[in-house]
Amino acid sequence: MAFISYETSQNMLALLGAAPTRTENVFLGDALGRVLARDIVAEEDYPGRPMAAMDGYAVVHSDLSHGRIAILGENPAGSDETRRVEGGLCIKTFTGAVMPAGADTLIPIENVTVEEEQILIDTPVPRGFSVRPIGESYRKGEILITKGTTIGFAETGVLAGLNRVMVPVVVRPKVAVIATGSEVLDLGVAATSPSQIRSSNNYTIAAIAKMAGADVVQLGTLKDDRASITAAFENALETADIVISTGGVSVGDYDFVKDIIPRLGAEVIYKGVNIKPGQHVMLAQKGQKFLLGLPGFAYSSTVTAILYAVPLIRKLLGRGEGLHLVEATLREPFSKRSRKSEFTACNLSLEEGRYWVDFEGKKAGSSAILNNMLGDTALMITGEEDGDLDAGTAVNVILLDRF
């Protein structure tokens, strides 16, 4: 069987017609972590009038040279100040208050001495000092937050300042997760044979999908039975945008998933990618729904979920499909194990602005060692044409702290 390259598989995934199709409005307080469905555009200048940036006295700048200015009164924040500052007069104005008409400068309290309803100028300031000009934060018509942005604390604050009670967001894609294999036991089920293994794939993949922004429904574990797997896929496709399964995509007699997916009427985009771990990856599409068949080994299914499920979820959220890559430097030599694109769990550290990679504590072995992903771990990428690498070599790594 001829496998396609990793680069080709990613290019084909990027070209898929997957995009957000549904939006909803949610209360601002519930919008954290959601993906914005439309650009947020300023409807007016802010501030709309000059405002005081600190506590001080609103003055006409030319009066500072006189050394002494009479105090007309106070202007607290939130007050509707109507008095006008003219030559020889000032108004005590507090942080956040609108600057009185006529004033062009605010001299801080610390720069003056108050004496008999007058201020004595101890330290002059430049013209316009500590005055927020009209439109300092934003201008009417300015795009403040672009669609596709994941709403964080800063976006929340800006939206609140705009009085956006409800926020338009992309509906989270629904991901259904299925683990297959007669040897696989779900959590809490008692083992009856030493050949049985505990299911972890479906929980790991569910966590990855949630981190990427999807809603997840767990469909549990299924025996290697063609009828039950087919029924599970059919049911999942009724409501899910993406169906992810583990196991059943290799070449064994009981690997039914690879045959079931095309019989469901799905178009197979590709099956088999020249990567390690997890070369038996299957991606298919049925209408606007996607099916992703991943290998059964824990490390393989985890890595391939990161490489293929995460970009697909990001596309359906309108976030773009790219993973977070950085350049790092090898602390130690690396021995490449195959002529495939390899994704190797590594320790990642940041020192003086530079990323470093090492493999201390990482076990070499089969594609079942999921605990290699524990700790401050990243995935180091080596290409098909790469051989063994010397210490000091620059490499690309995929960050795993967020998707």
Image (spheres, rainbow, N blue to C red):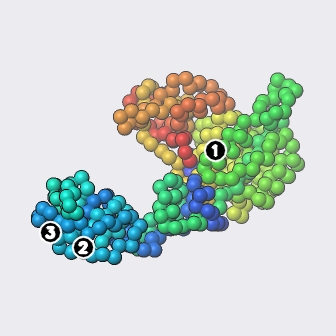
Is residue 40 in view? yes
Q: Secondary structure at mark 3?
A: helix
| Residues at marks 2 and 3 touching, judged by CB atoms closer than 8 Å | no
| In the depicted structure, whether residue 223 falls above or below residue 135 | above
Cα–Cα span, label 2 and label 3:
12 Å
Query: Horizontal and vertical percent for residue 180?
Result: 79, 41
Q: Secondary structure at mark 2?
A: loop
Q: Residue 85: which numbered mark, if any? A: 2
Q: Earlier in the sequence, mark 1 or mark 2?
A: 2
| In the depicted structure, whether residue 44 falls above or below residue 136 | below
Query: Horizontal and vertical percent for residue 84?
Result: 27, 76
Q: Amino acid at mark 3?
A: Ser
| Residues at marks 3 and 1 touching, judged by CB atoms closer than 8 Å | no
Quarter of the image where the N terminus is located:
top right
Task: Give the labeled residue for mark 1.
Answer: 208
Q: Nearer the viewer, residue 335 or 150?
A: 150
The structure residue drawn at horizontal position 66% and vertical position 43%, both measured from the top left corner, is 207
Query: Local crowd at mark 2 within 10 Å, few (<14), some, or many (≥20)?
Result: many
The structure residue drawn at horizontal position 47% and vertical position 36%, both measured from the top left corner, is 386
Q: Nearer the viewer, residue 55 or 205?
A: 55
